[in-house]
Amino acid sequence: MKNLEKLKEKIYKLLPELKKLEFGCEVIVRENDKSDMKYIISYCEEPESGCYEDKCPTILGFYKYDDEGMVVCNLSTYFTEGIAEIIGKPIGIAEVLRIVEVVTQEQLRETGMEIELLSNWSKIFEIRIMTILSKWKLKEDNIDNQKKETIDWLNEII
């Protein structure tokens, strides 16, 4: 498994809300049992009372990008049973910063000392944040577009 995939797996595990079926979540949909297509949810309807559990919630309005980067709309209706895989929402710098805060606190907790008593807690966190900000390509927020060096470093600290 590549370092990027390992890192994304860790982040999705620590932030499970990124895999909720809602706006922005990427999914793989099995279309007519012949091919799987990757879509991004643009609208998700809450289950109505009395609906069959295996057919709710209904997801309406996917969109995807073609090979040239153009948006291709698909306004078909899919039930959750048609989703072959939930990829999750894209991971950006906000998610990475949240994870680094949680992981830093856990690492310091493992030392047996209370975080409030550790005078270096804020310094460790601040150094990590500054390092991320200096390494992150801010114009391309998605973690998929970051340098290998950045991904490798994040894998070490998370």
Image (tube, helix red, strand yellow):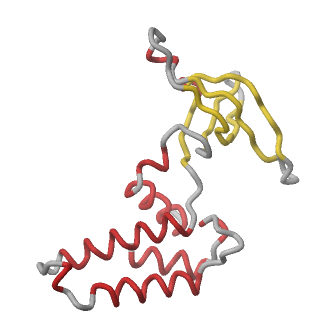
User: In terms of depth relative to the viewer, which is nearer, 55 or 9?
Assistant: 55
**Residue ID at (56%, 79%):** 150
Residue 7 image point, x, y percent: 48, 65
Is 70 left or right of 6, judged from the image as shown? Answer: right
Farthest front residue in view: 116
User: In terms of depth relative to the viewer, which is nearer, 88 or 37?
Assistant: 88
User: In terms of depth relative to the viewer, which is nearer, 124 or 82?
Assistant: 124
**Residue ID at (41%, 55%):** 15
Q: Quadrant of residue 63?
A: top right
Q: Quadrant of residue 83?
A: top right
Residue 135 image point, x, y percent: 58, 84
**Residue ID at (88%, 53%):** 68
Q: How many marks?
A: 0
Farthest top residue in view: 50
Residue 65 image point, x, y percent: 79, 47
Q: Is residue 64 above or below residue 53?
A: below
Q: Quadrant of the C terminus?
A: bottom left
Farthest left residue in view: 112
Q: Is residue 27 above or below residue 49?
A: below
Is 39 left or right of 16, judged from the image as shown? Answer: right
Q: Quadrant of residue 60?
A: top right
Residue 107 image point, x, y percent: 25, 76
**Residue ID at (41%, 78%):** 156
